[in-house]
Amino acid sequence: MSIFDGQRLDNRTFKLDIERMRRGWYSDKYFVNIAVMLNELSRRKYLYRGDKTNLPPHMAPNDLLVGDIEVEMQWFTRRPGTTIVVGVDKALTMLKHCTGYWDGDHFVDTHEQLEVWAVHDGALVHYNGDPLNITPVMRVRGRYRDFAMLETPTLGILTRASRVATNVYETLIAARGKPVLFFPARFDVHEVQAADGYAYNIAVQRFNMDYASTLGPFVSTDAQGDWWGGYGGGTIAHAAIASFLGDTAEAMLAFSEVLPKSIPRIALVDFNNDCVGDSLRVCRKMFDRYRALIEEGKPDEAERYRLYGVRLDTSGSLRDISVPPLGDPDLDLGVNPRLVFLVRQALDNAAETWDVPPEWVERAREYCRGVKIVVSGGFNPDKIRRFEKLGVPVDIYAVGSSLFNNHGPTVTDFTADVVRVKVHGEWVDMAKVGRRPRDNPEMERVW
């Protein structure tokens, strides 16, 4: 699965559309055209006819069957700095099942004729901006016509999965080890959820390894956990509160009554644009039910009503009514540091005004102060770093679209280049200007 267990995923996980991939359905047409051309030249036993080559002076291309040319190709990213590589196992699965050629209606599988090296998912590569000093994550040697059509889909999975994983990793660093909930499913088509959730999980594991942390993954859909055995989790939606006529506390009581107690009770408290007021109301109602069940001798049932947290999701165009206006949108609107401080202060002091029996006073304080604060809505590494620098009492960040960011320093585009060809049994450098063969000691021979 990754560097964390030394195992690789296979097509039992990916379930590739093998038939259409073999026919170039997912490939840029120019790669399909190249494969068709080379296959036909091979059938005709076409010999090299050119009068100019980039071969060393001592070599001649006599009797070179161009259609059967063997090449060495390397895959790499040009994202600046450090990239967490993800998507390798799926790219290898494409090579394993779709390398070969069509003989009429019969596909001739030639993947075993390739020589393949690759890193594991979760490996790190570094790029300093010089294209001559890239770090390859995969290397393949073999007859080019057999795998030419696979350049597009292999690059696609490496690019997307590595971008998501690296964006998550940098977000975790910004959050200083606080949990980051993976909430971007709604911002792309559903077909990519499994790959995205896998990339997120790899990033969490890499962060834990690099920073001696113990964070667990939290995805929002079951599909995001498909490749690694995870399941979606979540809180309560604004629509549910609307179904309860805007009564957030009543919605949470019903949620807690019906849903398994293994699901954390996190109240969404911005529906009425009063995060402080609704946080206090939810907390009191949930505590009262919790206390009543304890006193009835039903501690297990009481745990249904333990409020795990409140989530602030105020729109960036609104000022919560509890935030005094200062006239600066950055200070007034959306989920801003002042709003979080106000909610934390209100929760920490809530029990001081409650009329509870003396034996419940300390337990009420602990209940309120144990409620975590989750924030969402427009969070990215820059905003998270600002919150952390200010010491804003956030416990969990829920992050969405920024994890798909692909602009400037987050562009993670992968490229594949032929860098050597085999002529009369000898491997010869044959990279385009600005490229050269490169090694990566973390690559291992796959087959």
Image (cartoon, rainbow, N blue to C red):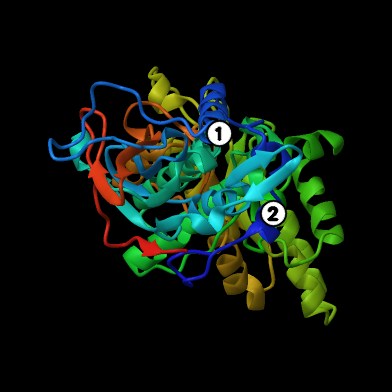
Q: Quadrant of residue 149?
A: top right
Q: Is residue 160 visible?
A: no
**Residue at position x 87%, y 59% in the image:** 258
The residue closer to the viewer here, 140 or 183, is 140
Q: Is residue 175 left or right of residue 303?
A: left
Q: Position of residue 87 (x, y in %)?
A: 50, 49
Q: Position of residue 197 (x, y in %)?
A: 59, 50
The residue closer to the viewer here, 271 or 284, is 271
**Residue at position x 36%, y 29% in the image:** 48
C-alpha distance separating marks 1 and 2: 46 Å
Three-letter amino acid code of the residue under disc 1:
Asn
Camera-near label (1 vs 2) is 1
The residue wearing badge 2 is 232
Q: Determine crowd level at label 1: few under 14, some 14-19, many 20+ residues with C-alpha closer than 10 A.
A: many
The residue closer to the viewer here, 346 or 191, is 191
**Residue at position x 77%, y 79% in the image:** 299
Q: Is residue 5 visible?
A: yes
Please determine whether, in this image, residue 271 is positioned above or below residue 260: above
Q: Position of residue 163 (x, y in %)?
A: 44, 40
Q: Quadrant of residue 212?
A: bottom left
Please determine whether, in this image, residue 374 is positioned above or below residue 287: above
Please determine whether, in this image, residue 22 is positioned above or below residue 407: below
Checking the image for residue 39, the label placed there is 1
Q: Determine crowd level at label 2: few under 14, some 14-19, many 20+ residues with C-alpha closer than 10 A.
A: some
Contact, CB < 8 Å: mark 1 with mark 2? Answer: no
Q: Is residue 404 left or right of residue 383?
A: right
**Residue at position x 56%, y 29% in the image:** 40
Q: Secondary structure at mark 1?
A: helix
